[in-house]
Image (cartoon, helix red, strand yellow):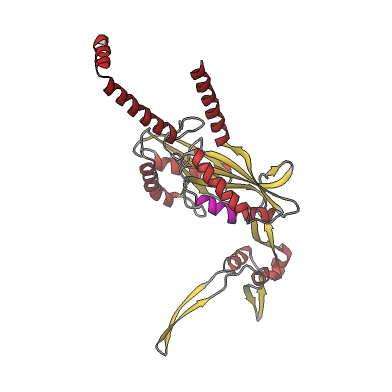
Amino acid sequence: MLDYLINFSLKNRTINIGLFAMILVLGSYITVNMDVDVFPDLTAPTVTVLTEAHGMATEEVERLVSFPLESALNGAPNIRRLRSSSAMGISIVWAEFEWGTEIYRARQIVAEKLATAQSKLPPGVGDPTLAPISSIMGEIMLVGLTGDGVDPTELRTIADWNIRPQSLATQGVAQVISIGGGYKQYQIIASAEKMKSFEVSLIELEEAAKSASINASGGVINEYGTQFTIQGEGRTNSIKDIGLSLVKMKGSKPIRIQDIAEVKIGTAPKIGDGAIKAQPAVVMTIMKQPDANTIKLTERIDALLDATASQLPKSVKLDKHIFRQTDFIQASIDNLQSTLLEGAIF
C-alpha cells in the first residue's frame, strides 16, 4: 500500500502540488479566523435562575425558594445535575444539561418549568429570572472608574447609566456587573416618635411612599371634535415633592411624609466596596457570551471605552488594564509563534 502511494505521488506530481496548495490555503484561512481562548470551554450547557427574597433569612430562602424551584426542575428533559446556593435575600439555582444540548432549548425548558413553580413561592418573593448566557471562562475584562474628589455615588451613576448600557449593546457581551461606589437611593427615614404622635402606622407610610411618585391615566375627553388625553403626572425626582406627599388626613389637617420622616438622597448599604490603588473606585466586570471571540470582542470594547472616556468629566479616570483575558491569549500566541519560528530555523 505504501509503495502504491509513493508511485502514485511520483507519477502525479501536478495533482500533489495542487492538493498541497489547496490544503495550505485552507489551513491558513482556518488558522487566521478560528477562535482563540485561554482554555477550552469545559462548561456543560447551564441555565442560572436568580430569585430575590428580600428580608428572608438564609434558612427560609433555602426552604421556601430554592427547594421548590429545584423540585420543579427535577425530571426536566436532558438535565444532568441541579445545584443551588441560598443566601440572605437571594436564591441561585444552576440547572446543568447534558453535553450537546442547545442552550436556547435548555432555557426554554427551564422557563416552562418555572412558570408552574412560581405560584408555589411565598408572597413577597420576586419572580425567578434567567441569568444571561455566559460560561465559567466568561470574565474577559475588569474596568475601573476612579476620580480625585469625585463622590462615589457619582462614579456609580456614571458606571450604571453611561458605560454599562453601551457595553451591553456591544455584540458578544453577556453581562456587565458593577461593584463599589454608592448606589443612589431616595430614602425615607421614619421617626418612630413622630409616627406615634400623628398616629401613623408603618403600613400607611409605606403605601404613601409607593404612591408618592407615580403617574395615573385619566382616559380621554372628546370635545370640539378633538380627543384630549388626560394624565395625572405625579412622578418626580424632587425630595421636596416626595416630602409633601399626603399620608392621610387627621381631622381637617393633612399629614405629609415630611411631618413624620426625613426624606433624603442616600446610598444603599454596602456589603463590599471597590478600590484601585487604595482609592475609592467602581470596578466593572464584563462577561462574554460562550461563542464570542475573546480577542475581537476585546477590541470592540476597547474602541467603545476609548470613545466613552473622552465624554467623561476630566476628574474621572477610566482604567481598562486591571485584568484582560486577551493579554494572556496574546502572550500565548507570541510564545507559540516564537517557538515555531525557532523550530523552522533549526
Residue pictured at 47% horizontal, 48% vertical: 171
Is residue 167 among what the camera can see? Answer: yes
Residue 271 picture quarter: top right
Left or right: 284, with 47 as reference point: right
Q: Nearer the viewer, residue 7 or 200?
A: 7
* Residue 52 x/y as whole percent: 53, 49
Left or right: 17, with 259 as reference point: left
Left or right: 91, with 6 as reference point: right
Residue pictured at 47% horizontal, 42% vertical: 289
Classify 159 as above or below 17.
Answer: below
Is residue 89 among what the camera can see? Answer: no
Residue 162 picture quarter: bottom right
* Residue 83 x/y as whole percent: 47, 36
The number of numbered discs placed on residues in the rendered structure image is 0
* Residue 76 x/y as whole percent: 36, 39
State the extent of the magenta-drawn residues as a range: 162-169
Residue pictured at 49% horizontal, 19% vertical: 344
> In the rendered view of the protein, which quadrant contains the N terminus?
top left
Left or right: 218, with 156 as reference point: left
Look at the image and say whether residue 279 sits in the magenta stretch.
Answer: no
Q: Main secondary structure of the magenta part?
A: helix
Q: Nearer the viewer, residue 111 or 28?
A: 28
Name, please, the residue furthest toward the right. Answer: 149
Look at the image and say whether residue 163 sits in the magenta stretch.
Answer: yes
Classify 71 as above or below 183.
Answer: above
Q: Nearer the viewer, residue 243 or 324?
A: 324
